[in-house]
Each structure stands twice: as structure tokens, then as C-alpha cells.
Image (cartoon, rainbow, N blue to C red):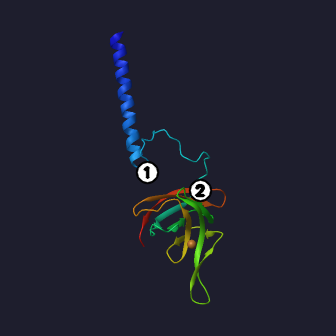
Amino acid sequence: MLTGMKLFSGALISRVLALGLLGTLAGAQHEGHNMPMPMTKPPQKMQVEPTPVGVSITGAFVAAQPPVATDTALFLTLKNTSKAPLTLVGGTSPLAAEAMLMKFVKLPNGQTSMKMVDNFVLAAGQSLTLSPGGKHLMLMGLKAPLKIGQMVPVSLQFAGGGVLHINAVVKKF
Ligand SMILES: [Cu+2]
């Protein structure tokens, strides 16, 4: 009986140690988390959103900015691989207070300015590239300066309620 108890508690301890180790490894992948995170922690969003089908994302990045900057932008190429039109209506990021779709426009005086855009529509099979000097998802009110190489989680929102969660690396352009 005593031996059984010892075995039991020994097994329990090694299980706790294993969980602790996994927690530390998981925590190490998230910059800024010093405390080990339990493996079973649910995603931050309580609501499960539908993921749009037929969307592929390539080359996503966030423009590196000087540490004093409070705004930056997300660039990427979206491809609508479905047979129906796809409409990007906006996005959110936990690292920014606000995000909005914008494009650069040439003013009559030759200067460039940014203009808010309601949405970007992709016909079936069409690709759309958001690039510096063109269309972009502006990330405004950064909660902390972004570091080169850091991953920025962004949730892209589509008409019809679809949400696509991506990670974009911070880099110079
Ligand atoms: Cu902008």
C-alpha cells in the first residue's frame, strides 16, 4: 500500500514537472510573457468566428518605424482562391488601438496623402497586393514600439463576418 502511494505520488510529480516544462516552452514563444503559460489556456477571443475559405495570404509584413512612431501599416498579398467575390472590410490587432483600410492618393498639388477606404473587393481568383505607397491596413495607436523581427497578430475582417488571423513580421522596407 505504501509502495503504491509512493508510485502514485512519484507519477504525479513527474506529470507536474512535465506540465511545468511545457508551460515554460510555450511561454518562451511569446515575447513579453515572463510567466509560464499553461498549455490549455483558451484563445483570447471568446467568440468563434467563421474563417473565410478560399483566401491565401503571402508576404505579410508590418513596416518598422522609429520608436517614437505611434502608427504603422500592414502590407500583404491576398488571393481570392474561391469562385465568389471576397471583400476585405478591415482588421484589428491587439498591439494597436485601431486599424483601418487606407490608400495613398496623389493630391492636385503633387503631394501624396492617405485616404480611408471602406473595403477592398477581390473578384473570384483575383489577387490584391497592399504595398508601401499604395493600399494598406493602417495600424494606429501602437501600444508599444514594434521591434524588427517581432510578429504582429492581425485579424483580417471580411464581409459576411469572416475573420482570418495572421501573423506579420516587422521589417524595414
Ligand atoms: Cu495610412
Please report whichever mark, 2 or 1, sits nearer to the chain's N-terminal start: 1
Residue 31 screen position, x and y as percent: 42, 52
Q: Amino acid at mark 1?
A: Gly
Residue nearest the viewer, comparing 71 with 51: 71
Cβ–Cβ below 8 Å for labels 2 and 1?
Answer: no
Q: Nearer the viewer, residue 84 or 38?
A: 38
Camera sees residue 126: no
How much space separates mark 2 and mark 1, taking CA atoms? Answer: 25 Å
Residue tagged 2: 163
Left or right: 73 with respect to 50? left
The picture places residue 155, in percent across and down from the top left corner, at 56, 57
> In what quadrant of the picture does the C terminus appear?
bottom left
Rendering quarter of residue 25: top left
Amino acid type at mark 2 = Val
- For the N terminus, the quadrant is top left
| Nearer the observer, 4 or 31 | 31
Q: Which mark is residue 108?
A: none
Tell which residue pokes out farthest to the top in this image.
Answer: 1
* Ligand 1 visible in quadrant: bottom right
Q: Which residue is mark 1?
A: 32
| Category of crowding for the residue at label 2, using alpha-carbon neighbours closer than 10 angstroms: few (below 14), some (14–19), many (at least 20) | many
Residue reaching furthest to the bottom: 109
Are there few (<14), some (14-19), or many (20+) residues within 10 Å of tag 1?
A: few
Element on which disc 2 rests: strand
Q: Is residue 101 visible to us here?
A: yes
